[in-house]
Every structure is written in C-alpha cells, then in structure tokens.
Amino acid sequence: MNRPLVTTGAARLAADSGAWLDGVRVGLLAHPASVLPDYSTLHDRLIDLPDVDLTVLFGPEHGIFATAQDQVGVGESTYRGVPVYSLYGETAATLRPSAEALARCDTLVVDLQDIGARYYTYVYTMAYCLEECARHGTRVIVCDRPNPLGGEIEEGPVLDRAFASFIGRFPMPVRHAKTIGELARLWNDAEGWNADLQVIDMLGWRRSMWFDETGLPFVAPSPNMPTLATATVYPGGCLLEGTNLSEGRGTTQPFETVGAPWLNGRELADRLNQRGLPGVTFRPVEFIPTFHKYAGEVCGGVFVHVTDRDSFRSFDAYVELIKAARKQAPGDFAWRTEPYEFENDRPAFDLLCGTDRIRRDIEIG
C-alpha cells in the first residue's frame, strides 16, 4: 500500500497515543470516515490500544456508522462494550453533549471528515462539543482532516446571523475553504468559549489540494456523500433540499442527479447549457428514486457533469438550475415549507443560503 501524501491528525494520534492520551479517560466523537491509512477506524484502534482508556463514544448526525438517513434521529447504543451517545436525536437539545455523557471522560477527541460546505452539520456538532467542554472543564483534541474541496476557493453568500441554525451557525461563505481544525480554532477564539483545545495538525496538506490529491482513502462520511464528485457539487446541490425538486436521494448519484415528475429534462438541460456556466455541462435524464422525494415516480431532470472542477462554481450553477426549473414549471415548483433541521419558522432555502435575499431575487426574476 502506497504511503499517503498527507498524514491526518487521527493517524498522528493513533501512532503516538501515549503522547496525547496517557492517563486520561477518553471520549471520541467519530463516524465511518474516521479512518486510518490501513482503513481501520479510529474508534476501533482506540478500543484495541491497551494504553488508551476509551470510556465513551459520541455519534453525529447519521450515527457513528452513518446508517440513518438525513434528519432521522439516532438513539443511544453500545459499541464493543463502550456506550455511544447520539448527538442527533429527536430534538434540538440532543445536538449538545449532556453533562452526564461528558462526565464519563476527561478528554474528548473529535475526528470527523467535513465536506467543505457550510451546511454540512458535522462541524457544528464539533462546535457544540467545544462549547459544552469549555463549560465542564473537559479538554478537547480535534484531529484535523483535509477539506475535500481544497482551501483556496470560497463560494456563496456569507451567513447573516439572523438565519443561524444547525446548518449554519456562524458568518462564513457556503464553500468555506477551511479545515475542521481551522474552524475549531477560529470559533473557539471568536466566540469566546476558551475551551482547552488542542488541534493535531495534518502533515503534508497544501491548500491547493483536492481530496484525491492527498493519497488518502475517501470513505463516505454520510449516506448520500458517496464520492468526491458528490462533494464537488454539494455546495450548490444542497440548496435543492430547500425546494420540492429531488436532489437525487434514492439514486446512486445524489446531488448530481436532479429532477421532478413535472420537469422536461431536455428543455431544462438546453436552457442551462445556453447559460455557458464554467466547468459544467447538463445532460437530460430520467430517473426513479427508490426513497425520499418522488419515491417510485419517474422524474425528468438533469445530471450535472463537472468538466473542470477548478473553474466550476457549484453554488452559482445550482441557483441557475433552480431558477430554470421554476421558470419551466411555475405552477409545480415550490419552496420547502416543512420543518427543517429543527427549524420551522424560516424557509429551509433561506437557512441554507444564510439570507433571504437569493430566494426573494429569484421570486422577482
């Protein structure tokens, strides 16, 4: 097996656990993408290491094995004799670790693979843990991992705090170009939490790197994030969750596949391709989702082919896609009105954008 170009914080921790975890009770916040270079998980490694006292596990949205679909509450469980506390249950209160759970450890290790888009919830689970650990005097170690989209290009509006939620708590653009370790340091300082925070930095990572240039294995961190191609379109593709368009959940290529039963895919692709957006081509498709929106129904739509990822701007492309779909079928298109990520008083599309300006601009043409 070739040696990765990048050494993650988790790999450094596992290689010298005594330097970080000697003599303390350890908690771990992790998920399936908390992998080491040999494809084992950090949670298994820490359980197996005789000099590490792993006393509690925490799972973010989707659970430690990402078995739950989006917005499905996860309960408590046990893994290899270690209690697992869910940080994504049925209410917003479950997003924070409880005092009871934190009392089980002296140091909380966070090892989560982020995707680089503001709405991806794992970074906010990390942030809630930082806040609560600061209150309870628990040390936090964040194992840094690459931003799959690199660390140079930002996209989309900066969040207005009036639209803060679990899919965007702090002012930053949609494609934020930060690593989870950088966000931990930034928020701990800017928000005044003053947690006892230590970030285990990566070795060898450069801001220009896409994930497939790191030599690291890409493991799906959530059920509908199977590949780097999915992550590439996600900063725009997730906007579809704020509409009644299918974002391709229930297909093998979510977020790249977009449509609805009332759309004409050929007309939509032609209109979008005429826009000449950089780095992308739209291909007409028909598909039948096996679950989620329009399960079992034939949908017309488009497949989003990224032809040049360096020039492609996902947020702009999907705003144009939503505009074109709404223009083609104004009587059928609708903004999502159901509760979304524990919020029911503001439109989901506005929460995703971090502002209501884009929705209002689309509505007035």
Image (spheres, rainbow, N blue to C red):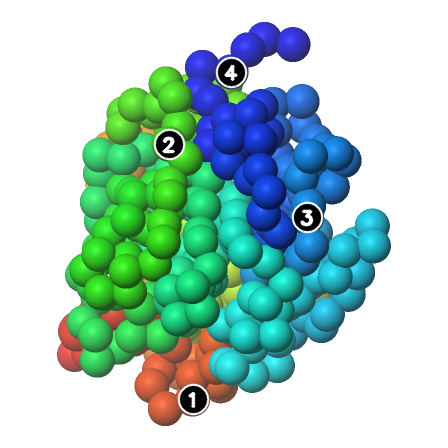
* Disc nearest the viewer among 2 and 3: 3
Left or right? Give the position of 158 relative to 209: left
User: Where does residue 329 sit, x and y in percent of width and height?
Assistant: 39, 73
Amino acid type assigned to the residue bearing label 2 in the image: Asp
Residue 317: image location, x then y, percent? 29, 50
C-beta proximity under 8 Å, tags 1 and 3: no
Asked if the residue at tag 4 contacts the one at tag 2, i.e. Cβ–Cβ closer than 8 Å, the answer is: no
Q: Which is closer to the viewer, label 2 or label 4?
A: 2
Q: Please report whichever mark, 2 or 3, sits nearer to the chain's N-terminal start.
A: 3
Q: In the rendered image, is residue 318 in sight?
A: no
Q: Which mark is residue 344?
A: 1
Q: Residues within 10 Å of mark 1 (few under 14, many from 20)?
A: few
Observer-side mark, 2 or 1, equals 2
| Mark 2, residue position | 201
- The amino acid type, in three-letter code, at marker 3 is Leu
| Badge 1 or badge 3: first in the primary sequence | 3
Residue for badge 4: 4
Q: Residues within 10 Å of mark 3 (few under 14, many from 20)?
A: many
Up/down of 174 relative to 21, above or below: below
Residue type at mark 4: give it: Pro
- Earlier residue among tags 3 and 4: 4
- Which callout, 3 or 4, points to the residue nearer the camera? 3
Q: Nearer the viewer, mark 1 or mark 4?
A: 4
Residue 54: numbered disc: 3
Q: In the rendered image, which quarter is residue 291 located in?
A: bottom right
